[in-house]
């Protein structure tokens, strides 16, 4: 009886791109730290007694200062939601810096399109080692995925047991595994920017409503011209919450869109890398 050539590929070797062993303690530590820092700024910097004509001598968690001397000092009178909003703003700045560093590193050292063209040129000349050297120069997520695929590509060239279609599938699988390890690192912590974009506006409106409640309560205890003065002052103080909330939300939305656009560019480069490897192998090693 004739020998039957096995069609199943041998057990695949683990991907050459290993999971990145990096913790994500910043995801819970940064927001907590920023809110505490926001309170300290509100309580001791903005709410320092020297900023008011009638400071509260008792102090405490929330001193009842009156007579703000400046616009910044009036922000203190916006209420206890203000330090939370300051904390949200500081959290946004923290994650913008963190994501900027990560995405910049993931983009690599050169233009992604130019890098892919160089690899295509080297593969067309059947010089896999030079293509791998280009990956070492490029670095970043695209370089890492391409390098993992090229190692499998080189291994499949010398493999005499598998058909071309199976070799291409092995290269494609290696690229997919490497991609699955790279993409979570790119998208990590973006959820904080998208969440704060919505929550900051709601917190600002909550602070404004609470401020309006206090203003109208004070209005009921006074009369005449003094009532109108207190009402206008209270509304002004309450609107600081709205301004802080909308401003923080706007920055969050803008930076979230900036990062998702850059990540989409990197993802496109990764997809193009996988397509380049499979098409090149299928064309050069039939």
Image: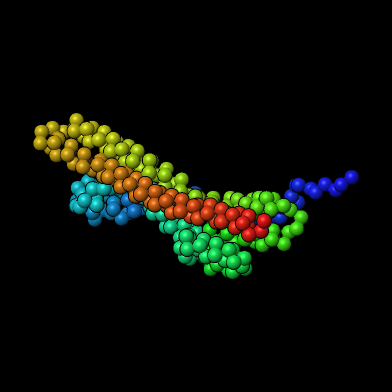
Quadrant where the N terminus sits is: top right
Using the image, determine if residue 204 lies above or below residue 116.
above
- Residue closest to the eye, 105 or 125: 125
Give the tally of numbered discs: 0
Residue depicted at x 66% and y 62%: 154
Q: Is residue 166 left or right of residue 26?
A: right
For residue 198, which quarter of the picture? top left
Q: Looking at the image, can residue 112 be seen? A: yes
Residue 78 or residue 148, whichever sits in front: 148
Q: Position of residue 125 (x, y in %)?
A: 59, 66
* Residue at x-position 37% and y-position 46%: 253
Where does the image place residue 87, in percent across and percent down from the top left?
A: 38, 49
Q: In this view of the protein, can residue 33 be seen by the observer?
A: no
Give coordinates of residue 251: x percent, y percent. 34, 49
Whether residue 156 is situated above or below residue 254 in the rendered picture = below
Question: Residue at horizontal 13%, vertical 32%?
Answer: 223
Q: Nearer the viewer, residue 210 or 165?
A: 165
- Front residue of 45/58: it is 45
Measured as percent of width and height from the top left, residue 119 is found at 55, 63
Residue at left offset 22%, top offset 46%: 66
């Amino acid at each position: 009886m004739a020998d039957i050539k096995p069609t199943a590929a041998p057990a695949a070797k683990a991907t050459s791109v290993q999971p990145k062993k990096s913790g994500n303690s910043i995801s819970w530590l940064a927001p907590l730290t920023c809110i505490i820092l926001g309170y300290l700024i509100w309580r001791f910097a903005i709410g320092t007694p020297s900023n008011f004509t009638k400071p509260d001598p008792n102090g405490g968690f929330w001193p009842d200062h009156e007579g703000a001397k400046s616009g910044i000092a009036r922000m203190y009178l916006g209420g206890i939601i203000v330090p939370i909003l300051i904390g949200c703003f500081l959290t946004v700045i923290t994650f913008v810096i963190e994501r900027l560093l990560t995405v910049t590193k993931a983009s690599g050292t050169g233009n992604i399109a130019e890098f892919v063209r160089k690899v295509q040129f080297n593969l067309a000349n059947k010089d896999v080692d030079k293509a791998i050297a280009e990956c070492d120069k490029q670095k970043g997520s695209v370089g890492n995925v391409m390098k993992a695929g090229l190692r499998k590509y080189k291994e499949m060239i010398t493999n005499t047991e598998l058909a071309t279609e199976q070799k291409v599938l092995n290269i494609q699988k290696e690229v997919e595994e490497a991609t699955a390890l790279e993409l979570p690192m790119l998208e990590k912590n973006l959820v904080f920017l998208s969440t704060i974009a919505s929550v900051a506006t709601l917190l600002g409106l909550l602070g404004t409503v609470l401020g309006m409640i206090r203003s109208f309560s004070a209005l009921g205890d006074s009369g005449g011209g003094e009532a109108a003065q207190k009402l206008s002052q209270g509304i002004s103080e309450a609107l600081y919450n709205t301004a802080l909330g909308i401003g923080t939300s706007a920055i969050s939305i803008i930076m979230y869109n900036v990062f998702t656009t850059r990540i989409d560019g990197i993802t496109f480069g990764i997809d193009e890398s996988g397509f380049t490897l499979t098409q090149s192998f299928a064309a050069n090693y039939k």
